[in-house]
Image (cartoon, rainbow, N blue to C red):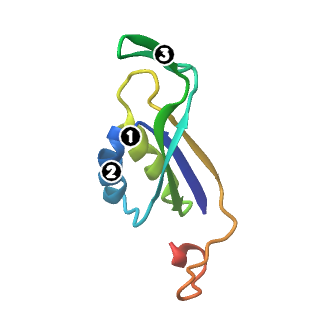
Amino acid sequence: MKMVMAIIKPFKLDDVREALADVGVTGITVTEVKGFGRQKGHTELYRGAEYVVDFLPKLKLEVAATGEQVDAVVEAILQSAGTGKIGDGKIFVWDLERAVRIRTGELDADAL
């Protein structure tokens, strides 16, 4: 099993959710986060004053996937979250040792 974490632009959430549903993902966790990468924020104008926005609003998605699903999950996020512009985000994948459904006690792939 793998945990897939993606940082995406907020307005791409619906597209990503639909793409993940199409590849069989039954659940995701979404967290509102702020951060910066290579783009290092930007400047904005508010009431005539210019100020720097260091941390940009993003969404963090977390998807637990079986080993067979992980490539399809990554590809679905990659295709649906991309705009071709700076700040599209990143995808991280790491090993998931165990998953347990609290209600039933099901383990690993059965718990997903």
Question: In the rendered structure, which amino acid carries the disc numbered 2?
Answer: Ala
Foreground disc of the pair 1, 2: 1
Considering only order in the chain, which callout, 2 or 1, is on the residue closer to the N terminus?
Answer: 1
Q: Residue at x 32, y 50 (%)?
A: 19
Residue that badge 2 annotates: 19
Q: Is residue 105 visible?
A: yes
> What is the spatial separation of the Cα atoms under label 1 and label 2, in whole angstroms?
15 Å
Q: Secondary structure at mark 3?
A: strand
Give the vertical position of 52 relative to 58 (above or below): above
Residue 102 in which image quadrant: bottom right
Residue on which disc 1 sits: 10
Residue 1 placement: quadrant: bottom right
* Side of 8 relative to 34 (left or right): left
| Mark 3 lies on residue | 51
**Which is closer to the viewer, label 1 or label 3?**
3
Task: Please tell me which residue lies in front, 40 or 26.
Answer: 40
Residue 80, visible in the rendered structure: no
Q: Which label sits in the foreground, 3 or 2?
A: 3
Q: Is residue 91 above or below residue 54?
A: below
Q: Are marks 3 and 2 in contact (CB under 8 Å)?
A: no
Disc 1 is placed on an element classified as: helix
